[in-house]
Image (tube, rainbow, N blue to C red):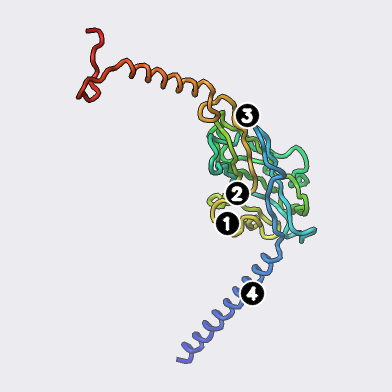
Amino acid sequence: MPILLHRKQATQRAASARCVVLLAALLFMASRAAALPMISLGTDAPLVMDAGTSGDMLVDIFSDVVTSDPAEHLSGWQVTLVVRPDPGAAGTVSFTAATEPSADYVLESLPVTLGVTTIPAPIPSLATTLTIIDGELAFPVSGVAVPDGSGANLLDLMLSASINARGSFGLFLDQNVPLSVWTDAGTTSNQFFANAIDVDGLARIGDIQVIAAPGVPGVVPEPLSALTVLWSLAALGAWLRRRRIPDGGVGIPVDDRA
């Protein structure tokens, strides 16, 4: 019996110790998460393009702090982007390419990276959803501090508008699977972007405006279409005048040639 009691006390002490360790770990993680810089994504200005053409859109990344601890530096990122039409828009806007920006890329100072990679490769005229990743491959991971204010460039997107497109479209971060996240250099764990932390679904980060192409059916009414309607009505009226309804008849045509 004393052995059993001793075992029980030892088990209780071990369980208590595990609880203390777990609580301390949770408190550490919570305090660290609260101290992490709030990193967001956005675009400089709306992309304006004509229907049936393509245009470039630059996605920026920026932090809410001037300096950050090295453990909180950005070591990798993954974004799933979606294009959706706003109410009243027509046609489609799709991704045709996603590449590393030509200047001021946020990870350009790192010695070895995966490189901006799309998963899967975009399909022209069909890709309205696109996942892109990049990250540091060297070990140990060093990461980079994300600038505050104007930030740095993250991604150069090429988008294409269908010939019948018109109106406004939105560029969204998708918080479904696969997630849109960034990785810190300390624990290499995933962190949500600040402007999509509490979003279950889509978080808007950019705007696209498509100018309708003149003369495209369903976009701009053609002048001839109105004339055709008027001509048809006039012809119908003339045909009806040639018909004679006899007394007591109910619209039964009578042959005038008799």
Q: Are marks 2 and 1 in contact (CB under 8 Å)?
A: yes
Mark 1 vs mark 4: give the one in front: 1
Q: Say what secondary structure mark 4 lies in.
A: helix
Three-letter amino acid code at the position of disc 3: Thr
Residue 147: image location, x then y, percent: 77, 52
Q: CA distance from mark 1 to mark 4?
A: 29 Å
Q: Which residue is mark 2?
A: 173
- Residue 114 sits above or below residue 224 on the image: below
Instruction: Please report contact status of discs 3 and 2: CB closer than 8 Å, yes or no.
Output: no
| Image position, residue 225 (x, y; %) | 49, 23
Q: Residue 131, image x and y in percent? A: 59, 43
Between discs 2 and 1, the one toward the N terminus: 2
Q: Which residue extends farthest right? A: 66
Place residue 160 in its image quadrant: top right
Q: Amino acid at mark 4?
A: Ala
Front-most of residues 48 and 231: 231
Instruction: Identify the disc placed on residue 199.
Output: 1
What's under tag 2, amino acid-wise?
Answer: Leu
> Marks 4 and 2, how far apart in space?
34 Å
Mark 3 — residue? 53
Q: Position of residue 106 (x, y in %)?
A: 74, 47
Compare residues 179 and 256 and report the one nearer the observer. Answer: 256
Tell me the quarter of the image containing the N terminus. Answer: bottom left
Indicate the quadrant containing the C terminus: top left, top right, bottom left or bottom right: top left
Q: Residues within 10 Å of mark 3 (few under 14, many from 20)?
A: some
Q: Which one is closest to the eye, mark 3 or mark 2?
A: 3
